[in-house]
Image: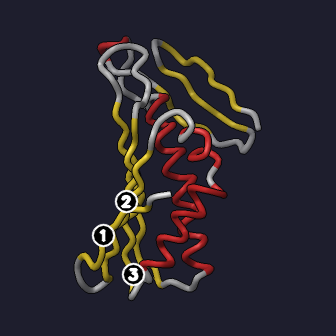
Amino acid sequence: MDAKVSWNQAMSFTGSAGTGFSVPLDADAGAGGVDSGFRPLELMLVSLGGCTAMDVISILRKKQQVVTGFDVHVQASQPDSHPHVFTKARITYLVTGRSVDEAALVRAIALSAQKYCPAQAMLSQVFPMELVYEIYETDGGLVKKGEWLP
């Protein structure tokens, strides 16, 4: 796997990878940027969320769960002092569907965390992650909330 980051101007860069896709990177005005792209650490959280989201939705589909909406929110804490590393994270799986089976969702989250998601496997070695979920009925409200614990 290869990636490249190319400088545009000021604090603006373009990140690209072997797939041919690119993503804008920048900093805020206080750091010399013009706020025209992702911060590098934001992309780490997007990567983590995307990695586990792809696992979980794939597993739910294989388990024939009727999912009509799915979001993964990743919130990470950082200290005020440099280098501002992540100290903990909370990943929230928000699943909307028709009679989504809680056991199927919990199993999908567990498989992602323990077997399939390389981003989660790497980053969980550096900081703790809390994995929580909420299940919503398509034509109703919240059905169930919970937390997956290894």
Residue at the disc numbered 2:
132
Determine contact: label 1, label 3, CB under 8 Å.
no
At label 1, counting other C-alpha atoms closer than 10 Å, the crowd grade (few under 14, some 14-19, many 20 or more) is few
Residue at the disc numbered 3:
97
Mark 3 → mark 2, Cα distance in angstroms: 17 Å
* Mark 1 secondary-structure assignment: strand
Determine contact: label 3, label 2, CB under 8 Å.
no
Near-viewer residue (50 or 123): 123
Q: Tell me residue 21's x, y (percent).
A: 64, 42
Residue sitting at x 55%, y 69%: 108
Amino acid type assigned to the residue bearing label 2 in the image: Val
Amino acid type assigned to the residue bearing label 3 in the image: Gly
Q: Is residue 66 left or right of residue 61?
A: left
Mark 1 → mark 2, Cα distance in angstroms: 8 Å
* Mark 2 secondary-structure assignment: strand
Quarter of the image for residue 23 reads: top right
Residue 69 bears which disc, if any?
none
Q: Residue farthest to the front? A: 150
Q: Earlier in the sequence, mark 1 or mark 2?
A: 2
Determine contact: label 1, label 2, CB under 8 Å.
yes
Q: Is residue 18 left or right of residue 112?
A: right
* Mark 3 secondary-structure assignment: strand
Mark 1 → mark 3, Cα distance in angstroms: 14 Å
Residue 145 bears which disc, if any?
1
Q: Earlier in the sequence, mark 3 or mark 2?
A: 3
At label 3, counting other C-alpha atoms closer than 10 Å, the crowd grade (few under 14, some 14-19, many 20 or more) is some
